[in-house]
Amino acid sequence: MRVIISGGGTGGHIFPAISIANEIRTRFPETEILFVGAENRMEMQRVPAAGYDVVGLPVAGFDRKNLLKNIGVLIKLRKSLSLAKKTIRDFAPDIAVGVGGYASGPTLKVANQLGIPTLIQEQNSYAGVTNKLLAKKAAKICVAYEGMERFFPKEKIVMTGNPVRQDLKCTPAKREEAYAYFKLDPAKKTVLIVGGSLGARTLNQSMSQNPDLIENGEIQYIWQTGKFYYEDACRSVKDKKGLPLHLTDFISRMDLAYSVADAIVSRAGASSVSEFCIVGKPVVLVPSPNVSEDHQTKNAMALVRREAAIMVKDSQSVSELIPLVQDLMKDEVKMNALSENIGKLALPDAASRIVDEIEKICGK
């Protein structure tokens, strides 16, 4: 087979895309795979590091607040459509897979125009405008939440879950390794604060503006800031020597972080939520308000309704998050219930299920 996988922008899109590519490679070692991403976004580094070729489109997202800025966006979109058409004609794929992100829109639109079968991997519980438009000509739509027929044709929907990073299984051996890796105290409970691959301003403020609460608690923290916020975070705690935390801009060993965490605090991106279900740890979600259709709140509420997570509004996070987390860590009954309920929602074989659909579409 020859397969194009398009999308990116954040780790939440890139990691599932690479998981799908790895599963294809495992099943069909001779498959040619080409990624199509957005120029100057993180996929241009992460995809080659995973061993795959990538083409960058000059595409950008629409500015919903300043409409005049969209003149430049439209020019970039036109160029992206032209480059996507050339790329697809040159590569001649059997199928194009869209995982979300700026590049997937023009790539799948052109593939449909050229008669190439397309598959959409919709990660969120609330579908975006682009995927709803692309769904009209898609062969299959792989989803991670129930009730998606309100966005897509029912006969095209397949419940697969979201692909996640491999090797997320938490084991006692990894937990012991993690204590040494992060220089943590095995006698204390551990909270993982992670704002996604790019970081989250509000989560960082919740930590940096409450150093006394952190210092006086019986809890230690792994705090991932994201590269844009790391220096500010360091300055915020430089006068507080001996705070019980491991501060870093990026965690490369998420398997160790998940293994050692007794609870997790995070944004509610679809890929992250899928990982949390597999990890099966208590989760406090602080949805980002800066995403289209407020889809992170909808992702979080899909868990909250099943008593599988706690949600804190972004606007209340700085004052409420750390006290809530500290109270939660003292409530073993609540912790156990959250862990059990979120584990019931896990779909660990998502990449394999998606490749099953790719096989059917391509007739391989």
Image: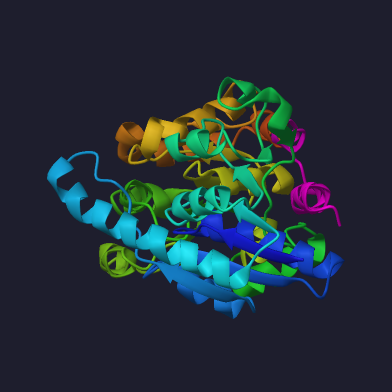
Is any atom of residue 297 visible in this view? yes
Q: Residue at x 34, y 65 (%)?
A: 58
Q: Residue at x 57, y 72 (%)?
A: 90
Q: Residue at x 75, y 49 (%)?
A: 354
**83 sits to left or right of 177:** left
Q: Quadrant of the rendered structure where residue 249 is?
A: bottom left
Query: 190 or 213, which is in the foreground?
Result: 190
Q: Which quadrant is home to the C terminus? A: bottom right
Q: How is the image coloured?
A: rainbow
Query: 12 or 330, which is in the foreground?
Result: 12
Q: Please say if 251 is above or below 269.
A: below
Q: Quadrant of the rendered structure where residue 171 is?
A: bottom right
Residue closest to the far left? 68
Question: At which x and y percent is residue 237?
Answer: 31, 64
Numbered circles on residues, count:
0
Question: At which x and y percent is residue 195?
Answer: 44, 53
Q: Please say if 71 is above or below 85.
A: above
**344 sits to left or right of 146:** right
Q: Please say if 130 is above or below 168.
A: above
Q: Residue at x 67, y 54 (%)?
A: 164
Looking at the rendering, the stretch of residues picked out in magenta corresponds to 340-364
Query: 145 or 77, which is in the foreground?
Result: 77
Question: At which x and y percent is residue 363?
Answer: 84, 52
Is any atom of residue 18 visible in this view? no
Q: Main secondary structure of the magenta part?
A: helix
Q: Is residue 131 magenta?
A: no
**302 sits to left or right of 279:** left
Q: Which quadrant is home to the N terminus? A: bottom right
Question: At which x and y percent is residue 42?
Answer: 44, 68
